[in-house]
Image (spheres, grey):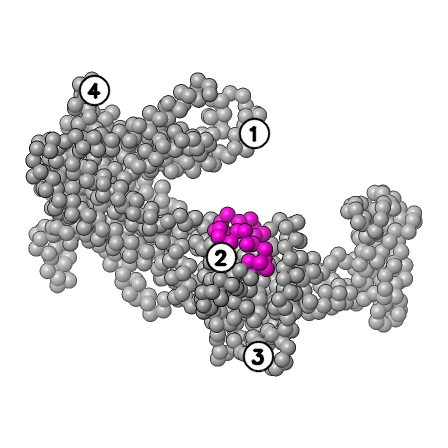
Amino acid sequence: MTTSTRAQQILTGSIGLLFASPMLFVLWRAITADRTSTAQFDDLIAPAWRTLLLATLVSCSAMVLGTLLAWLLMRTDLAGRSWWRVVLILPVVLPSFVGATAFLAGLSPDGFLTSALEFVGLDPPQRFRGLGPAWMLLTAFSYPFVLMPVSARLATLRPSLDESARLLGASPWDSFIRITVPHVRAAVIGGGLIVFLYVVSDFGAVQLLGYDTLTRVIFATRQADRATSFTAAALVLALAATALLLSRTVVGDIEPDTVQTIRVAKRHHLGLGQIPALLGCGLVTGISVVAPLSSLLVWAGRGLRDGRIDIGDLLTPTGNSAIMGLGAAVVTLGIVAPVAARTVRRGDAVSRLAGLAIVGGFALPGIVIALALAVLTLNTPAINALYQTIPVLALAYVIHFGSLAFGSSQDAARAVSAVLRDSARLLERSAVRRLLHIDLPVMRTGLMSGGGLVMLAVLKELPATLLLSPIGFRTLATEVWSAFEEGFYADAAAASLMLVTVSGVLTWFLVLRRVVAQSA
Amino acid sequence: MLEVDNVDVSLAHVTIGYGETPDVVHNVSLTVPACSTTVLLGPSGCGKTTLLRAIAGLERPRSGAIWLRQQVVSDESTWVPPERRNLGMVFQDPALFPHLTVRDNIGFGLRSLERSARVRRVDEMLDLVELNDVADRRPGSLSGGQQQRVALARSLAPRPGVLLLDEPFSALDASLRVQLRTEVATILAEIGVTAVFVTHDQDEAFALGDAVAVMRGGVIEQVGRPEDLYRSPTNPWVARFVGEANLVRGVADGTTALTSVGPIALRSPTAGNVDLLVRPESLSIVGPGTHGVVARVEYFGHDVRYEVVASDGAMLVVRHQGDHRASVGDRVELAYRGDTSLAWTAAD
């Protein structure tokens, strides 16, 4: 083994260790925590139960809703389906805390949703808090995580499979159960798992809606009672790990069907079923997009009219958000892409372990990563000056969202085939020039989309930003949060709209543009 | 219409189309005798696959009727869904269920059998296609040829009345295609199933078909045994589609036509300007002369193919067994060595 390959191995291993460090630290603290009183553990049973209940309810309802909508979009002649295909994934633009802010502000006595409900003769809810509202809102904002993979899966289901089953004597229902369901099952469960992790790690919505989950406990006890904080964090990790393992067992080892479809499947004729289908899509869009956006627009409009909002105030937080997003994207790619390329090209044990640590970062809630990094920096004398500084905040983003860049980077690395690299070798001796003129240009699309996903995620991130930002450092997310806490609904709405606009533009480039092109 | 005992599939005036676009299949009638293979042969887009899918019940004709073993399965008032037609079908892509093993794929259509009978039947099928050693693997790990054999075994397992094959070899590479074609022909003959086979490949059609129906633009141009199609095509298009053909211009005087390669005897009496069907193997180069100039030579081993520009400017293809007789640029004498020839009144 040459020195340079050993150095590469050590570097790869260190990157893996970096990504694993928050998790290892949390586990270590939870194990070594002072157990003088059992009271702290008993206090956590109820929040843990509530977290599990909410995550299970939301992932089940999101799986049902997302699958049903995917089927309507991909397999029926639903009226205006190319339009619905875009509209129905718009909720991914809304971070849960912005959605909750919009609903709470809209349902306040002088909010738009209150007047809208009164207008159609309905009583607005007296108290929009607790399990029910949290279940509804988190489902409304997370079902696209099921809808998108299931739609993609349905698009690859070859019509000849269903036709073969029919010719072998299966009725349409038989064929649906024996062929279609196994085909999309992995996508449904995979989407459900993402929703489960999303709910377990959600902090903004449950905090605003007053539903006491583990992330709320972590936030409340992070300074005064670290033992409880870390035990709660370990419980969150345990929940995430259990869900991950459970979904693996249920999915089994189904190989994805990679054969290209030759013909386009015939669509089911909905007939009179159009009416309930359209009403259903309308209701989902109403709750997940129209209601929150109109509530925000009305509040922001009021603030602008009576001069309480100065758009100029938003410039600094918008700039900070953009810079943090862009910076985190670049740094993440710089760290993650080499590991991703190594897993694709060599697939050695070190790079696979490092890859696992990077991907695992996705299952770690932001608040857990932030807690671990905050306490690590504070308790380590050599680096405690770094507490609440930009580098540590950026590191939290890198660890939290490295997985988003990892997959795209792997795809990008696969795009540079072995044959291409061999022929480049014969034509160009300098490794640096090969990297600059061959590898990077070919990998560009994949890397850009990975970076874009990181940037989008950073824009929408709340808990880590709250815990780790330097004092006085304002981003759009923290702006929404603090304005709402102080009751400045109009300011919260304006910052929210800015956040939604920026992430909407990014989402357009990353996701929607492709969807529109496909349905055209 | 046809109530003949030994006919397994019959179509009467079947028209298939969608909306305002022209019919994909127009007024097609066809009968497929029991225990024989009928091939639908035609260029892509001629409607052959659509016709096959209508027999399967995957497309519903706009008009016309389809019988399977004397039972109406499709007409104005009757529609039998695919799962109740007792048909087997092999698709262009193998269409194996990716989540099931080879064994479970083959057993998919045998749900009505008892467990032990099902296992026995699956084993029989595995023997038939010689895939016992991969029985417990998933389709994803098999080669293209193996996948198509599993697809064949799966469609034959429920003992279908009729087997439909939609270009099953087109995704395979050339040598494998020929090998699998022979295997399939042997299997079909062994079990004596009635088959309808769709292809755009004339070699495949001739190798497999007891009868071949040549389709073009949604209609059947001609149906017949391969040798009839080759020797007696009904029009120049069919003549060219089922093999290489020279159409040689000549002047007929009843029983003979005078052409640039000499006089040719006519199969039926004609007079005036005609186009004669001259297959390349009916021409030979007999030595130096004035009939034409060799423009191209392709050596195949078992024969040699020459392109000769005739004195009237027409391009003639000549095929010889054996070794080179001329090189590019040679002026040569041609001779017609064939039987009496078909002639069509000249187009212009």
Magenta span:
B125-146
Along the polypeptide, which appears first: circle 4 or circle 1? 4
Q: Is residue A182 left or right of residue A502?
A: right
Which residue, given by chain and number where applicable, does mark 1 sit on? Answer: A423
Residue A270, placed above or below residue A28: below
The chain ID associated with circle 2 is B
> Can you give x and y, in whole percent of width and height, for residue B166 in the image?
57, 61
Q: Amino acid at mark 4?
A: Ile
Q: Is residue B126 left or right of residue A341?
A: right
* Residue at mark 4 to residue at mark 2: CA–CA distance: 62 Å
Q: Amino acid at mark 2?
A: Arg
Question: Which of the two marks, 1 or 2, is nearer to us in this view?
Answer: 2
Which residue, given by chain and number where applicable, does mark 2 sit on? Answer: B103
* Secondary structure type for disc 1: helix
Residue at the spot x=12%, y=50% of the render?
A130
Residue B283 visible in the current orientation: yes
Quadrant of res B267: bottom right
Disc 3, disc 2: CB below 8 Å?
Answer: no
Disc 3, disc 4: CB below 8 Å?
Answer: no
Question: Which of the two marks, 4 or 2, is nearer to us in this view?
Answer: 2
Which residue, given by chain and number where applicable, does mark 3 sit on? Answer: B70
Q: Residue furthest front?
A: B116
Q: Is residue A454 left or right of residue B23?
A: left
Residue at the spot x=39%, y=33% of the render?
A352
Evaluate whether label 1 is on the same chain as label 2.
no
Evaluate whether label 3 is on the same chain as label 2.
yes
* Secondary structure type for disc 3: loop
Residue B123, placed above or below residue A305: below
